[in-house]
Image (cartoon, rainbow, N blue to C red):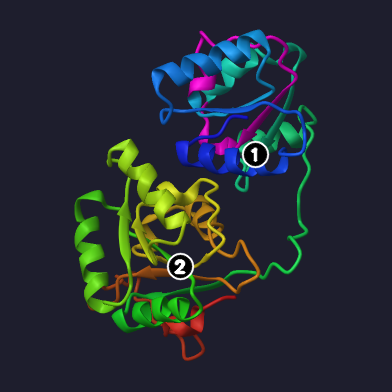
Amino acid sequence: MLVPTTLLVTQHFSTFAERMSGFPVVLKQLSRFQSDKEAREVMEGVAEGSIDIVIGTHRLLNPDMRFKDLGLIIVDEEQRFGVEHKEQMKRLRTSVDVLAMSATPIPRTLEMAITGIREMSTITTPPEERHPVLTYVGAYEDRQVVAAIRRELLRDGQVFYIHNRVNSIERAAARLKELVPEARIATAHGQMNEKQLEQVMLDFWEKRFDVLVCTTLVESGLDVSNANTMLIERADTLGLSQLHQLRGRVGRSRERAYAYFLYPGRSRSPRPRTNGWRPSPSTPTSAAAWRSP
């Protein structure tokens, strides 16, 4: 099973271990979180056939990886893998089944499905007792951020706060600490030491923090069922695919989930009007009027 991030390896490994606990299946993981010795043992086990399922990152695509009898490749978050990675997988595809999964398939994948080169199935039925995520779009306001975080804390939930600039993420966390002093806040971004990043994510997963101030690194399949509120600063700078993926990180349990896509208010970043355009009396002008469930 091929996944794009080390954090996903850990989560999938935990899920697979739980589901396969009653079966005689040998399961291992392979990512940068393993030591060289552990990685070498996993590669040897895969080559000799003593390991049945291996879950890993791009390390599975290394030329020195050998499989005794590979029967199935599962690719999670396929849109995160480039053409080069797919070419590396082609050398395994002559007699191997491939299952690729994505919430936001790339145009090339859609074209292959439409033209019949690939078969495509769409999962449209949500899990039992799953609610749609309520999404709000509007200008940033401190009091709205505070209200959203405190509402989540009152039901013992957790919050993702997306601030996609590493050089100012600590300041953003400090500002949140001033606004909501009772919240336990941690930060996470891709430039952190890998061991430190793993520990922060595991601590958040185990509910040692209430709010995770982070970059968009959490967009890839992360599953924290207790986190059901997400606030995204400068949502106007992110792409539609990113926003769709990020919103999918909340609402993964029975609780109602909320996603806030925030952009700078008019006083901070006025919107230019061109060609003499003015809103008509029937045009909604407040942020609240544009909110969509």
Residue lying at 54% horizontally and 21% vertically, measured from the top left: 60
Could you say whether the residue bearing mark 1 is in a helix, strand or loop?
Answer: helix
Please provide percent x and percent y for residue 34. 43, 27
Does 29 sit left or right of 158 as displayed?
right
Q: Is residue 249 above or below residue 83?
A: below
Q: Residue 105, located in which quarter of the rendered image?
A: top right
Residue lying at 46% horizontally and 81% vertically, measured from the top left: 154
Give the extent of the magenta segment.
59-82
Q: Is residue 230 above or below residue 201?
A: below
Q: Which residue is mark 2?
A: 158
Please tell me which of labels 2 and 1 falls first in the chain.
Answer: 1
Could you say whether the residue bearing mark 2 is in a helix, strand or loop?
Answer: strand
Q: CA distance from mark 2 to mark 1?
A: 25 Å
Please provide percent x and percent y for residue 4. 50, 35
Q: Identify which residue, 133 or 104, lies in the foreground.
A: 133
Which of pointers 2 and 1 indicates the residue nearer the eye?
Answer: 1
Does 52 sit left or right of 218 as displayed?
right
Q: Is residue 143 above or below residue 260?
A: below
Q: Residue 95, located in which quarter of the rendered image?
A: top right
